[in-house]
Image (tube, coloured by chain):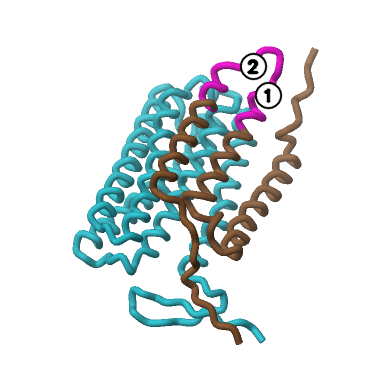
Chain colours: A cyan, B brown
């Protein structure tokens, strides 16, 4: 006989049974993140395949600015810390700090995106566009997709901030913050891989 | 029939521990950037070291910031399953396309 597990959906004040004993939303988020590994795996391996096959310049290390990208990486890493502090805040019922850390996370994400726009603009001025060569195509598609994910994450964070400011995100709904946090940390770990594979390894 | 609550009693790290993890990740990133500029004389292990450090950072963020170390085994299987599948599929793809094979030298 299979075990029955009970999950409390505190947001609605109701009790639902799930076979796993886990929140379905959390389960879905982790399944989604597992599938995202395949998406970014495809983009990263396409970059690895094409980066050395360009017949015309510029080549990767003609355009990369490692100190600048390192600073951007630091911002995204810092945003993972502020995100986890936002979750810890709502879990202990400190909604003022929750809003502070959510805003800090969104700001750090915004600075990262600003840096990416600056980097793309600089590369374009140096003669590298989406259609210049195979390196340009695969680089812009990979980092562009990542940038879109960060931008979506910022929108989610600002939505959470708005909900909290209007009193619609009580401590009982901390799982919503946890789910957005999972997405945000995933965006960070994808950048950890991109930073090493694309920028640091020749 | 067994009944159990889904309110898993998990010991999440404290805020102080999150800060310590962040400073650790920051230090590892610093080492990565240093390895980009300086190689260890006599040995060519920079790429392997960069790969290992990125894997370490990845594991720490997933384990501690995403709480997968403390969460249900099922969630771990879902994520690691996708990750391992991606690694297998794309490693096979890159091997098939000859990405890891050095181009023949022309004399």
Judging by the rendered image, the residue that carries numbered circle 2 is B40
Segment tinted magenta in the rendering: B32-50
Please tell me which residue lies in front, B20 or A105: B20
Asked if residue A34 is among those painted magenta in the image, a careful observer would answer: no
Judging by the rendered image, the residue that carries numbered circle 1 is B45
- Where is A32 relative to A14, above or below? above
Graded by Cα atoms within 10 Å as few (under 14), some (14 to 19) or many (20 or more), the crowding at tag 2 reads few
Task: Pinpoint residue B16: horizontal percent, then vertical percent.
Answer: 40, 44
Task: Pinpoint residue A62: horizontal percent, then vertical percent.
Answer: 51, 19
- Residue at 42% over, 82% down: A15
Whether label 1 touches label 2, CB < 8 Å: yes
Label 1 marks a residue whose chain is: B
Please tell me which residue lies in front, B78 or A144: B78
Q: Secondary structure at mark 1?
A: loop
- Residue at 75% over, 42% down: B96
- Where is B99 relative to A15, above or below? above
Instruction: Give the Cα separation between the discs numbered 1 and 2.
Output: 8 Å
Label 2 marks a residue whose chain is: B
A121 displayed left or right of B5: left
Image quadrant occupied by the N terminus of chain B: bottom right
- Where is B3 relative to A197, above or below? below
């Amino acid at each position: 006989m299979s075990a029955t597990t009970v999950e409390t959906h505190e947001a609605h004040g109701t009790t639902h049974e799930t076979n796993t004993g886990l929140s379905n939303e959390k389960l879905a988020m982790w399944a989604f993140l597992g599938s995202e590994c395949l998406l970014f795996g495809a983009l990263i391996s396409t970059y690895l395949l094409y980066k050395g096959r360009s017949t015309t310049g510029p080549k990767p290390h003609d355009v990369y600015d490692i100190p600048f990208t390192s600073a951007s990486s630091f911002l995204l890493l810092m945003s993972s810390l502020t995100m986890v502090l936002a979750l810890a805040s709502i879990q202990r019922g400190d909604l003022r700090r929750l809003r502070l850390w959510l805003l800090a996370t969104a700001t750090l994400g915004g600075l990262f995106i600003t840096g990416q726009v600056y980097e793309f603009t600089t590369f374009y001025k140096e003669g590298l566009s989406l259609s210049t060569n195979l390196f340009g195509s695969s680089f812009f598609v990979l980092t562009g997709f990542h940038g879109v994910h960060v931008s979506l994450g910022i929108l989610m964070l600002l939505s959470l901030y708005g909900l909290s400011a209007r009193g619609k995100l009580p401590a009982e709904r901390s799982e919503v913050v946890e789910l957005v946090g999972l997405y945000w940390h995933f965006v960070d770990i994808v950048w950890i891989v991109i930073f090493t594979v694309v920028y640091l390894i020749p | 029939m067994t009944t159990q609550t889904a309110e898993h009693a998990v010991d999440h790290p404290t805020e102080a521990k999150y800060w310590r993890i962040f400073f650790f990740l920051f230090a590892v990133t610093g080492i990565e950037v240093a390895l980009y500029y300086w190689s260890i004389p006599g040995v060519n292990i920079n790429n392997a070291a960069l790969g290992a450090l990125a894997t370490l950072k990845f594991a720490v963020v997933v384990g501690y910031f995403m709480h997968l170390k403390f969460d249900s085994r099922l969630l771990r299987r879902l994520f690691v399953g996708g990750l391992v599948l991606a690694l297998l599929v794309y490693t096979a793809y890159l091997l098939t396309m000859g990405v890891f094979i050095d181009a023949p030298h022309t004399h």
